[in-house]
């Protein structure tokens, strides 16, 4: 796809390793929604351009076919970029549209690992503000059965969901801690200053104590 003059001008602003998320948000704020421009930027295949494209897409035009194409393109990036893009797409577009949420809720056993990551990350995000959900027990059972055999990008999102279930739903806390002890996922992993370790026994203890739960 040939870039318009506007698209070329934007690329010159963001095609730099020092580009920050704040820079992209400021540009997106000026552009608002422009789906045609978003697709131009997307086809450049550049990481920052795709991040900006996600911010200015029109969510009403994100059919399942379009979402599948976006996810397929994202899967071609390196691991770090891939995870940033898929989470960015979920947070800035898919969870903002009721039709897309219906799709997300159907992706628990989808053959595409990135779709499964979205499903589990969405479940965790539903819970991290303390909004308990009626299906937590069922989801925890599935996590217990599947997490050790999942792709790493899906494991992280499953672990994230189990963590928030354990924090806010005391009746499941022991199971969530035991899950972490059994799998050993993220045990000893270094985290940035001020961040909570992802190892479930530590995560649940720290976050539940913060909230006096």
Image (cartoon, rainbow, N blue to C red):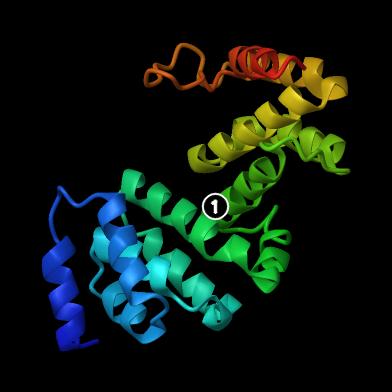
Dividing the picture into quadrants, the one containing residue 4 is bottom left
Residue 15 location (% of width, % of height) = 14, 61
Q: Residues within 10 Å of mark 1 (few under 14, many from 20)?
A: some
Q: Is residue 24 left or right of residue 14?
A: right
Instruction: Please name whichever residue, 123 or 212, is drawn nearer the observer in this view of the structure.
Output: 212
Dividing the picture into quadrants, the one containing residue 112 is bottom right
Residue at mark 1: 113
Position of residue 148 relative to residue 80, above or below, is above
User: Residue visible at 50% across and 60% down?
Assistant: 92
Position of residue 182 relative to residue 120, above or below, is above
Q: Is residue 87 left or right of residue 162?
A: left
User: Residue visible at 74% across and 21% down?
Assistant: 176
Q: Quadrant of the N terminus?
A: bottom left
Position of residue 208 relative to residue 115, above or below, is above
Dividing the picture into quadrants, the one containing residue 147 is top right
User: Residue visible at 32% across and 50% down?
Assistant: 81
Position of residue 125 relative to residue 64, above or below, is above
Q: Is residue 38 left or right of residue 124?
A: left
Instruction: Please name whichever residue, 13 or 83, is drawn nearer the observer in this view of the structure.
Output: 13
């Amino acid at each position: 796809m040939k870039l318009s003059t506007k698209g070329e001008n934007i690329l010159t602003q963001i095609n730099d390793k020092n580009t920050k998320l704040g820079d992209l948000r400021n540009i997106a704020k000026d552009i608002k929604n422009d789906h045609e421009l978003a697709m131009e930027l997307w086809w450049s295949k550049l990481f920052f351009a795709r991040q900006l494209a996600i911010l200015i897409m029109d969510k009403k035009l994100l059919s399942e076919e379009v979402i599948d194409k976006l996810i397929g393109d994202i899967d071609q990036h390196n691991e770090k970029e891939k995870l940033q893009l898929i989470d960015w797409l979920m947070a800035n577009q898919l969870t903002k549209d009721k039709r897309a949420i219906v799709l997300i809720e159907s992706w628990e056993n989808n053959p595409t690992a990135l779709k499964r990551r979205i499903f589990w990350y969405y479940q965790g995000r539903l819970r991290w503000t303390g909004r308990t959900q009626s299906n937590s027990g069922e989801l925890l059972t599935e996590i217990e059965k599947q997490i050790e055999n999942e792709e790493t990008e899906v494991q992280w999102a499953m672990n994230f969901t189990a963590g928030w279930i354990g924090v806010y739903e005391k009746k499941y806390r022991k199971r969530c801690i035991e899950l972490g002890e059994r799998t050993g996922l993220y045990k000893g992993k270094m985290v940035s200053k001020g961040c909570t370790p992802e190892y479930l026994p530590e995560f649940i203890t720290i976050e539940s104590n913060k909230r006096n739960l």
